[in-house]
Amino acid sequence: MATNPLSVSQREPYEHGPFTHFLWWLSTAEKEIITDCVIDRNRYSIIGYIVLTTWLFATGAWTYFFSTAIDNPWIFIPLGIFMGFIVLCIDRALIKGINRKNRNRLTPFLFRGLLALTIGLFMAQPAILFLFDKEIKVQISLDNETRKAQKRSELDSLYGQRKKELLKAKQDIEHQLSIQQSAVNEALDNYLKEADGTGGSGKVGIEKIALAKKNAYEQLDTEKKITITQSQPRLDSIQRALGNLESAVQKEEEAFAKLLNTGFLTRMEGLNNLLKANNTLRFRYYLIVVILMLIELMPVIVKSLLPSGAYEEKLALREEMEKEMAYDNINREKELKKIYNSLATENDSQVIRDFFTLSKEDRQDKIRDLSKRFKDDHRETFDSTWEKIKKGILSKQEN
């Protein structure tokens, strides 16, 4: 069956949907030019998909990053979206700077690659923390216990000397009391043995020797009670000081425990400690970092690898045309201004000539009036008349 192809003027323009237009916007393609480039329409849609993926990944990574430091979702979600939009703007600027003129130049590519690498390396960290969240939480728990032990050691070092002095003073007092108690016990034992005849002189009953031993016992017991009475305030003071030291240590430990958290830096430190102790995890960590960094580098890599097509040729020609038109418009504007200035000068000159011609007779009449006044009024002098002529008749030079 024969077909009747449409002529060029009858062909309908390519119609694209809003999502395709959005992909072109992501890939920084100009809609007016890309519409007529059949091959490049698909290329720049692919670039748009990659930029969209990078944008979503950046938004998710930054949102998770802020969630590790901020508990309120009404704060960390908008912050994550905002930072993701910044990454999107940077990606669009990077791929917009890649064109057929600098595509194969090393310096611009290295600069764009370094910038994308830096962003990708940072964005990979929150994603890694999310993937190894359970393992990192276990490691953070161990690290926090280590920190508590270190804090306890520091507090012991800080208060240790004072505590040692108090304990030494307490031990000295208790030792003195122990010596006195031993002497009292010994004196009591001697007295009892003397009284029941099992020791000493061997006589049963309260004799002189037993009474002497009893008196010695009672005297030692009295001295012991006096020592206890005198030492008790000192012991109480030492015990309070020890209690205060222990209370201060406990308060500082509690305050330090409240500072322990699971924020971003704490998680990163836990991840580093985890990687040091696990070779298998370390290999997978670096592998995931490379993959996540490639996500950020993909827009630049794809834009650099895809060949330049009709779109970039049209874009370059359109840019050259706009430059030429800009130069032409400026030159045209300059010529018009020159013509305007020339005609304005010519017409203004004629106006000035006409003005001087028409005012010539009036100036002469005014000079006659001033001369007549000088003649008729004897109070008028020549100099005063000349001053009036200069002020009222002579013209002033333009500056």
Image: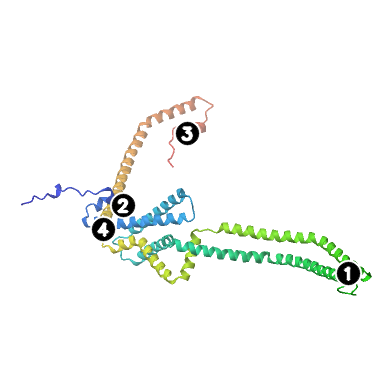
Q: Badge 1: how crowded within 10 Å, few (<14), some, or many (20+)?
A: many
Lower position in the chain sequence, tag 3 or tag 1 = 1
Q: Is there a contact, CB below 8 Å, between mark 1 and mark 2?
A: no
Seen from this angle, which residue lies furthest right? 208
Q: CA distance from mark 3 to mark 1?
A: 151 Å
Q: CA distance from mark 3 to mark 2?
A: 71 Å
Judged left or right of residue 174, residue 92 is left
User: What amino acid type should be assigned to the residue bearing mark 2?
Assistant: Trp
Q: Is there a contact, CB below 8 Å, between mark 3 and mark 1?
A: no
Secondary element under disc 1, as helix, strand or loop, is helix
**Up-down: is 103 above or below 72?**
below
Per the image, the residue denoted by label 4 is: 43
Per the image, the residue denoted by label 3 is: 391
User: What amino acid type should be assigned to the residue bearing mark 4?
Assistant: Arg
Lower position in the chain sequence, tag 4 or tag 2 = 2
Q: Nearer the viewer, mark 3 or mark 2?
A: 2
The residue lying toward the viewer, choosing from 284 and 55, is 284
* Residue 195 numbered tag: 1
**Up-down: is 58 above or below 160?**
above
| Quadrant holding the C terminus | top left
